Image (spheres, rainbow, N blue to C red):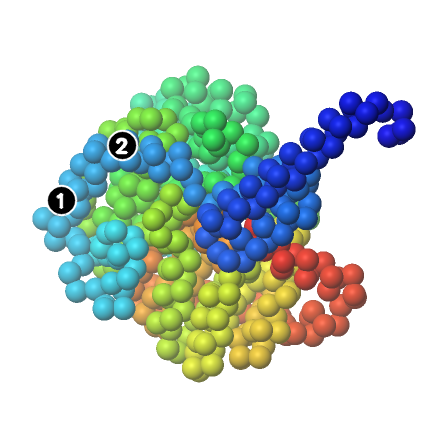
Amino acid sequence: MFSELSHVELSLIALALLALELFGFLCAAHAVLRARTSQGAIAWGLFLITLPHIAVPFYLVLGRSRFQGYITARREGDHQLDKIVDAAGQKALEAGLLKTSAHPQHAALEALAMMRFSHGNKLGLLVDGDATFSAIFAAIDEAREYLIIQFFIVHDDQLGRALKDRLLAAAKRGVKIFFLYDEIGSHSLPKEYTRQLAAAGIDVRPFHSTRGWTNRFQLNFRNHRKIVIVDGKKAYVGGLNVGDEYMGRSKKFGHWRDTHLEINGPAVHAVQLAFLEDWHWASGSVPTLDWNPRAAHDGNSSVLVLPSGPADDLETCGLFFMHAITIARSRLWIASPYFVPDIHVLSALQLAALRGVDVRVILPRKPDHLLVYLSSFSFLGDAERTGMKVYRYQDGFMHQKTMVVDDCLASVGTANLDNRSFRLNFEITAITDDPAFVGELAEMFEHDFTRCEQVGSEDFTDRSIWFKLGVRLSRLMSPIQ
């Protein structure tokens, strides 16, 4: 083929290849200077230098770990948003709903969240899809002023249409509705779905993670939050998206094990603040919402809401997990569908096990994301050597993101134990130090353990050479997954 090309054409091809190689070096330098972890810098640097014709397009799409556009929008809206935050905090303080004597070990959590634990909350644990969406749909039907609906994934299937019908009915009776979805997670959502909502007067927005010329080709910054808020009085957060698979209707996955949380009380406004920042980025507007805090009837739970994401000054999500692991003294139980911890989190887990903490991690047996699933096998030996216990959930697919620390801390949210949640996704986690709820979540874990099988290093070492190679390659790619 090359013999048929002229010297000029060959020269142009050589120049193009040289330019690509040079651009690969520039991108590698950028990765080394900007990557948040040394593993990520090394992985990207080697990839870009050795295979620039493949790596450069990937780096342009996946290479950044700071969402500069969101940061800029946050700064531009700071005055208006800060006024709302300050006013909401002052009202909660005046109403006596902010906890003034948080445990010293929780001070770091409040600093990360930039807000305090609130008390007077009532929490409802929602196990699996039927319980979750029965509660959410009943709350939507009761809405009188406004609804906030935010999901990473929305499908136009049986569950998605059931949600749409309820929202259309709510809009018809005069309820103001703000509907925010992630266009990457909801890439298969047909335009007709959102068109019908908009035609009914519902304010529908994609998160717009690709808005702006610097973000046009990136796929990193996904809004992984799942939030429903009703009239500023009731909120739902957790692991479930809107799709039939989350109701256990998938032939591939079968039973879908997940956990959501219902919050009544002043912590609802903390969830609302997280949504407000996302909505401001997506729409450029700040809607009028209810900011009058009120304690829930029979509410006695203290709750901290921790939003996290790639616009934070600190790695909020990763630091939350590090803190929870570090303060554990007797028990640390974690459920996460994706287990690709960085070296710091893995070391903290190992140290917790070495100091006698009962460290248990529940993972799914079935994969839904192959690379992440394969990566998890590479950590089994490290876990086993220090006494960590790893379980594979056997009854369908396990997707919940929950944690219990000793008898004093529990969390339910959207964050996984992986690089994407630590550094790239917008997440939200509800944390409580209410002993009764911690006990309830621990009972849920106990029930889940009966549906699990403990696995060890042999689950990796007894596999074929090709499986082991896939696992090792997946782990090498884990910093950029």
Residue at 53% across, 46% down = 29
Looking at the picture, does residue 33 appear above or below residue 192? below
> Where is residue 295 drawn, in percent x and y?
19, 50
Residue at 31% across, 23% down = 174
In-image side of 73 versus 155 (left or right) = left
> Where is residue 473 drawn, in percent x and y?
68, 58
Q: Amino acid at mark 1?
A: Lys
Q: Could you say whether the residue bearing mark 1 is in a helix, strand or loop?
A: helix
Looking at the picture, does residue 287 appear above or below residue 479? above
In-image side of 95 versus 121 (left or right) = left
Residue at 21% across, 64% down = 102
Q: Quadrant of residue 233?
A: top left
Residue in the foreground of this view, choosing between 159 and 21:
21
Q: Amino acid at mark 2?
A: Gly
In-image side of 78 versus 279 (left or right) = left
Q: Which residue is mark 2?
A: 77
Looking at the picture, does residue 410 appear above or below residue 477? below
Q: Is residue 278 visible?
A: no
Q: Earlier in the sequence, mark 1 or mark 2?
A: 2
* Residue farthest along the top direction in this orientation: 199
* Residue farthest along the left direction in this orientation: 94
